[in-house]
Image (spheres, rainbow, N blue to C red):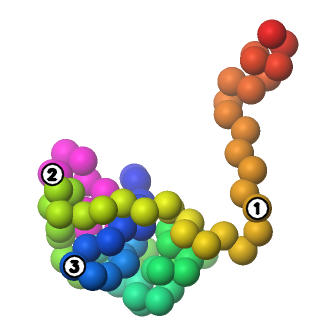
Amino acid sequence: MKFATFNWERGTYVGRVDEVAGVVECLRVGGELAEVEGVTALIGRELPDVTRRVPLSDVRFKAPVPRPHRNIFCVGKNYHAHAKE
């Protein structure tokens, strides 16, 4: 399951991406919460209801976490192999 933060019709939304159907299912996450928290607004709660389905071609994807509260560090799964090089 893929989740995304995106812009559509002058608003910011959080949704579930369905690549097979070519749509994003908008989830019921408040506008300001979606703008500030992005997909992290979904952590620790039940998946909100789907409010509408929007074609992928109509949305503009944003960073999944638009304004992180602290730095985010990521390490790839193959980091160990590259470190040996």
Residue at mark 1 to residue at mark 2: CA–CA distance: 34 Å
Q: Position of residue 70 (x, y in %)?
A: 76, 68
Give the quadrant of residue 26.
bottom left
**Mark 3 or mark 1: which comes first in sequence?**
3
Q: Is residue 2 above or below residue 9?
A: above
User: Does residue 22 appear to the left or right of 76 in the view shown?
Assistant: left
Residue ID at (50%, 62%): 64
Q: Amino acid at mark 3?
A: Glu
- Mark count: 3
19 displayed left or right of 73: left
**Looking at the figure, which quarter contains the C terminus?**
top right
Q: Secondary structure at mark 1?
A: loop
Residue 35 in magenta stretch: no
**What span is colored magenta in the figure?**
15-25
**For the residue marked with disc 2, what is the amino acid?**
Ala
In the picture as drawn, the residue positioned furthest to the top comes out as 85
Q: Residues within 10 Å of mark 1 (few under 14, many from 20)?
A: few
Q: Which residue is mark 1?
A: 71
Up/down of 10 relative to 22, above or below: below
The quadrant where residue 4 appears: bottom left
**Other-residue count near label 3 (Cα within 10 Å), few / some / many at <14 / 14–19 / ≥20:** few
Q: Amino acid at mark 1?
A: Asn
How would you classify the magenta stretch by its main secondary structure?
A: strand
The earlier-in-sequence mark between 3 and 2 is 3
Q: Which residue is mark 3?
A: 9
Query: Is 2 displayed left or right of 80 in the figure?
Result: left
Q: Secondary structure at mark 3?
A: loop
- Identify the mark at residue 21; answer none if there is no mark: 2
Q: Secondary structure at mark 2?
A: loop
- Give the farthest residue toward the right: 84
Residue at 50% over, 86% down: 33
